[in-house]
Amino acid sequence: MSDGRRPRALAEFSEQGLGPEVLDEIIENQVRDGEPPAARTTLERLLAAGHARDEAIALMGCVLSVELHEILCNETAFDGVRYALNLAALPELPYTLDDG
């Protein structure tokens, strides 16, 4: 998956040091640590569905970017329930590519 499929807000995150590589690292850490549990189960589900690992991690990073947007731009607390629901919906993205 190309980085162009990630929300445009990612450009703003990159300026703050939260580029795609950082999102991928956060996702890999979540999977490794099993916290939240939905991270590992989502990766396993996406891999079983035939997605390449890097694509699955990028999809999960899209969901993480939505949470980061809420936290950084809307000054809300991390919503673990929303995060888990958005992970469960993958490969359907929690936004449309036109959303910006």
Image (tube, helix red, strand yellow):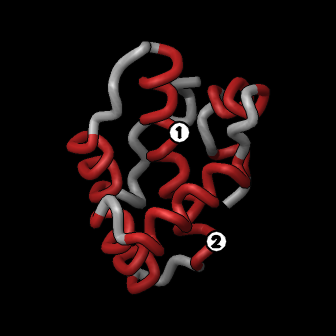
In primary-sequence order, the first of circles 1 and 2 is: 2
Disc on res. 47: none
Pick whichever, 22 or 84, lies toward us.
22
Q: Secondary structure at mark 1?
A: helix
Q: What x and y, as percent, mark residue 62?
A: 52, 47
Return the residue found at the far top: 74
Mark 1, residue position: 65
Q: In this rendering, would 59 be left or right of 75?
A: right
Compute the Cα span from label 1 to label 2: 16 Å
Circles 1, 2 touching at the beta carbon (< 8 Å): no
Q: In this rendering, would 51 be left or right of 83?
A: right
Q: What x and y, as percent, mark residue 18?
A: 68, 38
Tell me the amino acid under the disc marked 1: Ser
Q: Residue at x 35, y 77 (%)?
A: 45
Q: What x and y, as percent, mark residue 23?
A: 61, 50
Neighbor class of circle 1 (other Cα within 10 Å; few <14, some 14-19, many 20+) is many
The answer to which quarter of the image holds residue 80 is top left
Quadrant containing the N terminus in the rendered view: bottom right
Looking at the image, how many numbered discs can be counted on the residues?
2
Q: Residue at x 34, y 62 (%)?
A: 35
Return the residue found at the far left: 81
Mark 2, residue position: 54
Q: Residue at x 43, y 47 (%)?
A: 93
Tell me if residue 30 comes above or below residue 92 in the rendering.
below
Tell me if residue 52 comes above or below residue 2 in the rendering.
below
Q: Secondary structure at mark 2?
A: helix
Tell me the amino acid under the disc marked 2: Asp
The answer to which quarter of the image holds residue 31 is bottom left
